[in-house]
Amino acid sequence: MRKQYTSELTQLTVIEIVTKLSEKKRNFSFRDIEEEYQQPLSAADKFLIRCLIVKKFNLKIEYFSSSKANQLQFCKI
């Protein structure tokens, strides 16, 4: 049996948020998306965001490690 995750975000909402952030910044992360969305992201939300970023926006995903936290970062190619 596969796990079913429930997402609070819709594809349209993710597209709007990512479009705004990509216009403002060259690099952004899940934290930036949370700030724009003004709610914490669930695992399902992050999965949806990551899928749409790769498929629709063709952005590069980098693993960013800092002293604060390990974070994925989305970059324009």
Image: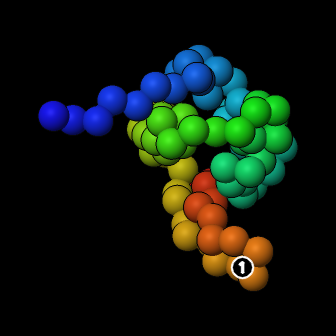
Q: Which residue occupies 63% across, 71% down?
A: 70
Quarter of the rendering occupied by the N terminus? top left
The number of callouts visible is 1
* Residue 49 in view, yes or no: no
* Direction left: furthest residue: 1
Q: Position of residue 26 (x, y in %)?
A: 75, 55
Q: Which residue is situated farthest in the bottom direction here? A: 67
Q: Are there few (<14), some (14-19), or many (20+) residues within 10 Å of tag 1?
A: few
Quadrant for residue 64, please give it. bottom right
**Residue situated in front as seen by the camera: 28 or 23:** 28
**Relative to 12, 23 lies left or right:** right
Q: How is the image coloured?
A: rainbow
Q: Which residue is mark 1?
A: 66
Residue 8's x, y, as percent? 58, 23
Toward which corner of the image does residue 12 lie, by quadrant?
top right
Q: Residue at x 82, y 41 (%)?
A: 35
Answer left or right for 33 relative to 43.
right
Q: Position of residue 45 (x, y in %)?
A: 54, 35
Viewer-nearest residue: 23 or 37: 37
Quarter placement of the C terminus? bottom right
| Residue at horizontal 57 percent and vertical 38 percent from the top | 42
Specify the amino acid type for callout 1: Ser
Q: Residue placed at 64% from the left, 39% from the top?
A: 41
Provide the secondary structure element on which disc 1 rests.
loop
* 44 with respect to 69 (left or right): left
> Does the image show residue 42?
yes
Q: Position of residue 61 (x, y in %)?
A: 52, 59
